Amino acid sequence: MTSRLARLWQPGNPQRRVFLPDFWMAVVDSPKAGRGRLPPYCVKFECDPRMNREDVYQYLIKIYRLPVREVRVRVQQGEIEYHTPHDYRNRKAMWKEDDKKIAYVYMDKGFKFNFPDIFAKDEETEMEKKFDEYQEGMLHNTQFVNRDRNGTLNVFYSSTTCLEDSMIHLSVPDTQVLVERFDSKRKYIAYNIHINGFFHAAVRFNHLFNFAEQIRQRFELKYRGPEFPPKRVFQLDAAGIEDRRIKIAKYLNALVQYPEIMRHSYVEKSFLDFQIESYRATSIFVSVDVYLADGEKHVIKCNVSDNTSQILKLLCSKLEYHDCDRILAHFGLFMVSPRGGSQTEASDVMIIRLLRNFESPYISLQNVNMKSAAQGVYHKLMLRKLIWDPKLEEPLLQNPLLSDLIFRQAKADFQHGQFAVLKEEQEVKLRAALQRDDKQQFLKLCHQQPSYSYEWMQNCESDYPVSGTKVQLKIGRRQIVLLHGDQFSTVSIFRATRIRVWRISQPVDDADPLIFQFEYLMAKDTFEWITIHTNQAILLSLLLQSIGAEILNEVNNMSIEEQMFGSGKSSAAADLEAAVTTRRTMPEIRSKPAEVIEKELEKQKKEEEELRQHANKETNGHGSNGRDSSPADPLGVAAFDDLFTTISDTLPQHNAAFSAINDSDL
């Protein structure tokens, strides 16, 4: 009856010792309604498997003096877990819980039992609940800062209804079966990771699991998202693989919501290692062609594992320029394709992708070209500027190399008709400066042209001014410009400083282009959502962030790379950690008096009229009766919280606001 050692018996009566067995009983709650409901005078117990009905009866009568009338006992079988339905049919259990003995004790009539709620309010649970509610409230507040104040807007604050303040759009759309590198007879499942709309790497589950374990150990107190799927003992079937793929995608999309994690050097290096392992290069030493904006080619000898920053530094050495930080601050490495599919003009290109430090430019280029070679399109790498206000180019003209790089891009844009000249005499001066190779004079004349310093995107579709409108899209000079109407003669201008929020979403049909939406201040107290259907939505979002970073660069004297990604030297862990140790406070927005706003609006009418005239000249002189959507931003923003946008499969992540920006900056 007991597993305890019995004590020595001593003569005498009555016995002064009580021998208690190591039996135990625990009250079990029963449902209030439904099949398992019990009458109020019946109590459900879970008891020791060795106890029988008499033991339960004596236990409750002798020790607790309860009015027990009847006891019924049954054995409840433990739950059995099967790995696959096939195992269930063959009775091959993967795991089985222990059996339980349940006792139903019926008391005398009139007895009423209420299950005790001992821990009605758990203090720790209440604290966690309050903290979660606080975080949820702060998340909602960041989307609509001071929304109840008339005439205020939150500059560059990306909306979300669903994912880092990060630049990464991450998805795991499918899987593939690969063979082991050194054993062709063994195969494994690899999960295809796409970043910013392009294939990045095919990674096996074991590597992803080790990555998630390192994230848990390093950032256990910071990460509060879904858990990474666990390992399984047996091989998964098709349904199990699909379920694991979905869970991996959810984990990665949740991970990019944490900028302090995504900016860490370990995460950057891990994604780079994933790409290198997936590519399986036959040689460590490779050469990659990097073009300047005018089509001049430079062959860079590098390692296959060199990331974007390292390639740019090697290019600086090739150009015999030692101040690489200035190149990293004002230029970016883009993947471009020939405009219109033509391979004749090396400088007539359209930007496709902005490369970052978590990838190898050589591998990214090879992956894209392997897919597009069937259509006869070959992409290439090109160095292009990330300067969106021409007045910021003027201090750089004193540097011979920087002025030469800017001149090459301006020359290529002028020759290929990317910007037109308002007056014929100015066009004559520009061509004369080109013949003399007078870079300073040519760039100064370019700065006077309203259509200079734009990046033309692919033709797309917009709901402005009406749904289904075919538009030409270009971004630059801190604004988005849509050309629509007959021969694209109507111009609609949307200034970046009047965009309150933007977001990216997936269409219902995967074959349709992505959806880029931004909320724009059309008039005083009047906001309107503008929708653009384009496959370059992610690139458009990154360029819009770069414009915001340029505004901060004027105020904080920090590079665009530092503003967007936390550190100019992202390969150094110390710099990355210093950039993300603390998050700044939420932004406050201060508005101006209405009289000042009206004066500023009138002041910019002449400038916008010149821009319309220039657009008409670009489109064969047709008149523009388009609605100008871009009066000056009347507001200043007082705080900035990490300019680092996250975009998910459904809707993007937050894009933080700016700090220390006044009216003169906007």
Image (cartoon, helix red, strand yellow):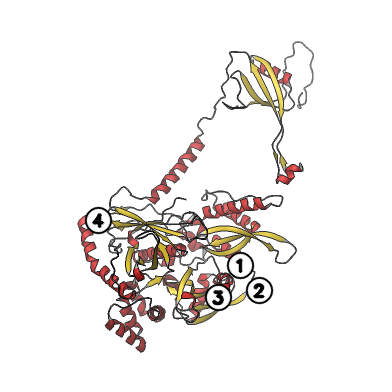
Q: Residues within 10 Å of mark 1 (few under 14, many from 20)?
A: many
Marked residue nearer the N-terminal end (4 or 1): 1
Q: Amino acid at mark 4?
A: Lys
Q: Would you name the residue on which mark 4 appears?
A: 592
**Mark pair 2, 4: CA separation:** 62 Å
**Mark pair 3, 2: CA separation:** 25 Å
Q: Amino acid at mark 2?
A: Thr
**Mark pair 2, 1: CA separation:** 11 Å
Could you tell me if the residues under marks 3 and 1 are in contact, i.e. CB atoms within 8 Å? no
Task: Quadrant for residue 332, please give it.
Answer: bottom left
The dot on residue 276 is 1
- 170 w.r.t. 90: above or below: below
Q: Would you name the residue on which mark 3 appears?
A: 376
Local SS, label 3: loop
Could you tell me if the residues under marks 2 and 1 are in contact, i.e. CB atoms within 8 Å? no
Local SS, label 4: loop
Q: Nearer the viewer, residue 424 or 644?
A: 424
**Mark pair 3, 4: CA separation:** 55 Å
Locate residue 290, reporting x and y percent: 51, 77
Q: Nearer the viewer, mark 3 or mark 1?
A: 3
Marked residue nearer the N-terminal end (2 or 4): 2
Q: Nearer the viewer, mark 3 or mark 2?
A: 3
